[in-house]
Image (cartoon, rainbow, N blue to C red):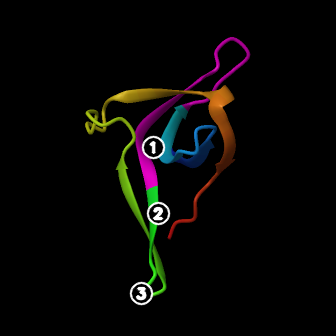
Amino acid sequence: MRTPSIKQFKLSNDDELICEVLEWDNEENSAIIVRCPLCIINGEDLDKQMRFYAFKPWMGFSEDPEILHTINASHIIGEVTPSED
């Protein structure tokens, strides 16, 4: 069984995504194939001095985890492997 490649991306439009990468871009194709891309939403509760995070589907009507998405690699400005926490 292969280990999923979970990555966090910062996009040029300021979206921040977390997803499973199935296929990376290459010299012939700039598309990255991903599964379950979730947009990271952050907020603050100033009264409690807390920051919180939530996830929502990146594409509004595609909550099915079997649907694959493509991300154009030229729109990614940052990438990291997120911590397990």
In the rendered view, tell whether residue 41 sits above or below residue 10: below
Q: Residue at x 66, y 46 (%)?
A: 79
Q: What segment is highlighted magenta in the picture?
A: 23-40
Q: Quick check: can you spot residue 34?
A: yes
State the residue in front, 67 or 45.
45
Residue 32 within the segment the image draws in magenta: yes
Where residue 68 appears, as percent x and y from the top left, is 39, 28
- Considering only vertical position in the picture, is 48 above or below 22? below
Q: Amino acid at mark 2?
A: Asn
The residue that appears at 28% across and 33% down in the rendered structure is 62
Sequence-wise, the earlier of marks 3 and 2 is 2
Quick one: 44 or 70, which is closer to the camera? Answer: 44
Real-space CA distance between mark 2 and mark 1, rounded to the nearest whole angstrom: 33 Å
Q: Are marks 3 and 2 in contact (CB under 8 Å)?
A: no
Front residue of 35/61: it is: 61
Task: Give me the C-alpha separation between circle 3 and circle 2.
Answer: 16 Å
| Element assignment for label 3 | loop
Q: How many discs mark residues in the rendered view?
A: 3
Q: Which mark is residue 42?
A: 2
Helix, strand or loop at mark 1? loop
Q: Residues within 10 Å of mark 1 (few under 14, many from 20)?
A: few
Name the residue nearer the viewer: 33 or 12: 12
Which circle's residue, 3 or 1, is located before the other in the chain?
1
Mark 3, mark 1: which one is toward the viewer? 3
Helix, strand or loop under label 2: strand
Q: Does the magenta portion include 65?
A: no
Closer to the eye: label 3 or 2: 3
Residue wearing tag 1: 1
Quickly name the residue at label 3. Answer: 47
| In this view, the mark in front (2 or 1) | 2
